Structures are given as structure tokens and as C-alpha cells.
Image: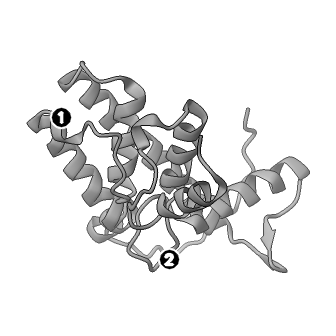
């Protein structure tokens, strides 16, 4: 059973340094899920931590609630730009796809491990947290290479990689905005 001090420390360490005061391999299922979610959200921008970043998650949540209420997304008496909302959702969707792909690939290269343990390791690598359920030393070389790639993508950031290769072209025209029926 985990006490409140260890639970608090666990919630902080999932987004930063990877220190642990509680053996991750014996976390209850709810603790594993919560830890994976916190690692996936990650740290704040400008820090050394990875993940989708707290600001991206906050922006996506605010935009989702605003959409349900039929309002423009706002926070702290400021309107959140549509571009920021699109970037936040882009980062989250790409991150989910990368984590799913890496988890699937490692499930193929290392079928002896359960999906939850593999997902835990992949999200920990992507968020550059450093927590482990103890299976990392036993993962095959191809699996470790996948984790290394995930660490790189998570630390540098997918948006940074994409924008470094993309060329911005200035168009002289500005198009009329159109509302598209969704769903």
C-alpha cells in the first residue's frame, strides 16, 4: 500500500527526473494507468522533461470544453488562438500515434512482455522520465533502438523536427474562412 508522501512524490517524478521511492513493477493497475497519463502529459515547456507538455494538454482540454459549451477557448482572461489549439491537438495526436506504433513494434520484437509493461516503458522513454517496470534490460536490441528513437522524439519534440524540415511559403492571398460540418 502506498502512503500519501510516496503518492505525491510519484506524481512529481513522473514528469521530471525518474527517481522513485516505490517499486514501479508492483504498482496497482490504477497506479500504472495514472503514472502513464502523467508521464505522457510530461513537463512544462522550457524544462528538460519530455511528453506532450502541460501547456499542450491544458490548451486541448480548454478547447474541448469550450467547444462543448459553444464558446471560443479562453484562459486567464485571454482567448487561446486557433493556431495554438491546432498545434496542441497535433502534438497530442502525433504523440499518441508514435506511442501506439512503438508499443506495437516492441510487442512484436519482445512478445514475452505484457502490453501494459511495454506501454509503460515506451511512454517513459517518450517523456524522457526514466521510470521503468524493470523490463528495459531484458528488451531486445531492436526494442531498445525503438526506445532510443522515442527518447529522441520526445525530448526534441515532434513539432521541432517537423518545422526544421518544413519550408514556410508566403502566400500573397488570404483565404476566406469556412466552417466545416464535423461529426
The residue labelled by disc 1 is: 139
Point out residue 36 in the picture as x, y percentages from the top left corner. 50, 44
Disc 1 packing (10 Å; few <14; some 14–19; many ≥20) = some
Callout 1 secondary element: loop
- Between label 1 and label 2, give the one nearer the viewer: 1
Report how far apart the C-alphas of labels 1 and 2 lie in the structure: 52 Å
Q: Nearer the viewer, residue 59 or 134?
A: 134
The residue at the point 24 percent across, 19 percent down is 112
Query: Where's residue 9, x and y in %?
Result: 55, 62
Residue in the picture at 25% in, 59% down:
152
Q: Which mark is residue 93?
A: none
Residue positioned 34% across, 33% down in the render: 118
Q: Residues within 10 Å of mark 2 (few under 14, many from 20)?
A: few
Q: Quadrant of the C terminus?
A: top right
Examine the rendered structure and indicate whether residue 73 appears above or below residue 124: below
Query: Residue under circle 2?
Result: 172
Q: Residue at x 48, y 53 (%)?
A: 39
Taking 170 as reference, is 110 left or right? left
Residue 4 at least partly seen: yes
Amino acid at each position: 500500500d502506498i502512503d500519501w508522501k510516496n503518492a505525491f512524490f510519484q506524481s512529481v517524478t513522473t514528469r521530471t527526473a525518474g527517481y522513485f521511492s516505490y517499486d514501479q513493477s508492483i504498482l496497482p493497475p490504477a497506479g500504472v494507468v495514472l503514472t502513464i497519463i502523467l508521464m505522457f502529459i510530461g513537463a512544462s515547456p522550457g524544462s528538460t522533461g519530455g511528453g506532450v507538455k502541460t501547456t499542450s494538454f491544458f490548451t486541448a482540454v480548454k478547447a474541448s470544453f469550450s467547444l462543448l459549451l459553444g464558446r471560443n477557448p479562453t484562459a486567464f482572461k485571454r482567448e487561446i488562438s486557433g493556431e495554438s489549439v491546432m498545434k496542441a491537438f497535433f502534438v497530442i495526436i502525433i504523440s499518441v500515434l508514435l506511442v501506439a506504433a512503438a508499443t506495437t513494434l516492441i510487442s512484436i520484437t519482445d512478445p514475452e512482455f505484457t502490453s501494459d509493461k511495454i506501454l509503460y516503458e515506451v511512454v517513459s522513454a517518450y517523456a524522457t522520465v526514466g521510470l521503468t517496470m524493470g523490463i528495459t534490460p531484458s528488451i531486445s536490441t531492436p526494442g531498445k533502438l525503438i526506445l532510443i528513437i522515442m527518447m529522441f522524439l520526445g525530448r526534441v519534440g515532434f513539432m521541432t523536427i517537423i518545422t526544421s524540415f518544413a519550408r514556410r511559403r508566403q502566400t500573397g492571398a488570404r483565404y476566406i474562412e469556412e466552417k466545416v460540418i464535423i461529426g
